[in-house]
C-alpha cells in the first residue's frame, strides 16, 4: 500500500533532524514555477490571498524570496520532520527507528500545494501554500489546475514501484482533491476517525488529524504490507467499526467517556 497524508501549516526548523538520510523532491521544477508566481505578490496581496495576518504574510513573502535550489541539509529539512501540526504529532517521526523511517520513505507520501508530492525524507524549504489557495497561474485559476494530473501520475508510479494494490487516503478533503483517483489504477481506501461527542459519533477535527498520524506510525512500526492489517489499528482506544464501514470507507470509533 501507499499512504497519503496532508502537510501542516506549523513548521519546525529549530529541532535538529533525527536522521542524516534525505532525498530530493521530484517535482522541484514545478515548485520553481509556483515560486516565480508567488514572488510577484506583495505582502499585502499574500495576506489577502491566504487570509494571513500581516506578520505571517511578511514572513512568507521573505520565504518565497529566499527559496532556491539546490536543497541541502544546511538550508532545508526532511519534510516529515519539518511539518509539526496535529498529524505529525501523532506520527512523531523523530522517535521512529530507522527501519520504520525507511518503510515510511517507501510507502508514505505527503501532498503539498508547493511541492506536489513529497516523500517523507525529501528535503523541504519552509513555505506556506495551501492546496485550496486560489492562486491564478498559467494553467488556470488555482493550484488544482496547476497540478492537473501530475500528482496522480507520480503516485501511480510509486504504487507500481511498491507493487501496492491499494492507496490509503489519510489526507484531508482539500488535499486529496488534488489527486485524480481514476488515474491511479488501484482502489482508494479512506479511514475515518469518529469520537463519541454530544450523544453521537462524529468526526472531531483535532482528534481525526492526530489519528491519521497515529495510523501512519502504526503501519510504519509494523512495516505493514497489507492494507487490511490497518483494521487492527487500536492506538489511543480507537477500534475498527465494521457495522458502519464498507470496502472503501473504514470507520474507526472510540468512546472515552
Image: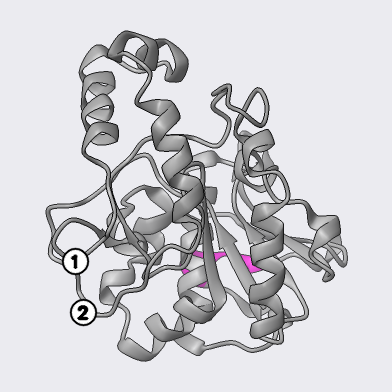
Q: In this picture, which residue range is highlighted in magenta?
A: 235-239
Q: Residue at 46% of width from left, 36% of height from top?
A: 34
- Which residue is at the front of the view, 146 or 243? 146
Dots 2, 1 in contact, CB < 8 A = yes
As drawn, is 104 to the left or to the right of 164? left
Task: Assess whether residue 121 is covered by the magenta stretch.
Answer: no
**Residue named by callout 1:** 73
Q: Quadrant of the N terminus?
A: bottom right
Residue 238 % position (x, y): 57, 64
- CA separation in Å, label 2 and label 1: 8 Å
Q: Assign a secondary structure to mark 2.
A: loop
**Residue named by callout 2:** 20
Q: Indicate which disc residue 138 carries.
A: none
Q: Residue at 63% of width from left, 44% of height from top?
A: 147
Q: Residue at 73% of width from left, 81% of height from top?
A: 228
Q: Is residue 78 above or below residue 46?
A: below
Q: Main secondary structure of the magenta part?
A: helix
Task: Give the colouring mode of the picture.
Answer: one colour
Q: Assign a secondary structure to mark 1.
A: loop
Whether residue 192 is visible, yes or no, is no
Q: Residue at 13% of width from left, 62% of height from top?
A: 74
Amino acid at each position: 500500500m501507499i499512504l497519503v497524508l496532508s502537510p501542516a501549516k506549523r513548521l519546525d526548523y529549530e529541532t535538529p533532524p533525527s536522521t542524516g538520510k534525505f532525498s530530493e523532491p521530484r517535482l522541484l521544477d514545478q515548485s520553481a514555477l509556483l515560486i516565480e508566481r508567488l514572488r510577484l505578490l506583495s505582502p499585502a496581496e499574500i495576506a489577502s490571498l491566504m487570509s494571513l495576518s500581516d506578520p505571517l504574510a511578511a514572513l512568507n513573502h521573505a520565504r518565497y524570496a529566499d527559496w532556491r535550489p539546490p536543497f541541502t541539509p544546511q538550508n532545508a529539512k526532511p519534510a516529515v520532520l519539518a511539518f509539526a501540526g496535529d498529524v505529525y504529532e501523532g506520527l512523531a517521526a523523530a522517535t521512529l527507528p530507522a527501519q520504520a523511517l525507511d518503510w515510511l520513505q517507501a510507502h508514505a507520501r505527503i501532498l503539498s500545494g508547493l511541492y506536489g508530492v513529497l516523500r517523507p525524507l525529501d528535503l523541504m524549504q519552509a513555505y506556506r501554500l495551501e492546496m485550496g489557495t486560489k492562486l491564478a497561474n498559467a494553467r488556470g485559476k488555482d493550484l488544482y489546475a496547476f497540478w492537473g494530473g501530475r500528482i496522480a501520475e507520480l503516485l501511480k508510479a510509486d504504487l507500481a514501484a511498491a507493487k501496492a494494490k491499494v492507496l490509503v487516503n489519510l489526507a484531508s478533503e482539500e488535499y486529496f482533491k488534488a489527486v485524480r483517483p481514476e488515474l491511479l489504477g488501484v482502489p482508494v481506501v479512506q479511514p475515518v476517525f469518529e469520537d463519541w461527542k454530544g450523544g453521537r459519533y462524529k468526526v472531531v477535527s483535532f482528534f481525526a488529524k492526530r489519528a491519521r498520524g497515529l495510523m501512519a506510525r502504526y503501519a510504519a512500526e509494523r512495516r505493514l504490507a497489507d492494507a487490511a492489517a490497518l483494521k487492527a489499528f487500536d492506538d489511543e482506544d480507537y477500534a475498527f467499526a465494521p457495522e458502519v464501514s464498507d470496502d472503501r470507507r473504514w470507520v474507526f470509533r472510540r468512546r472515552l467517556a
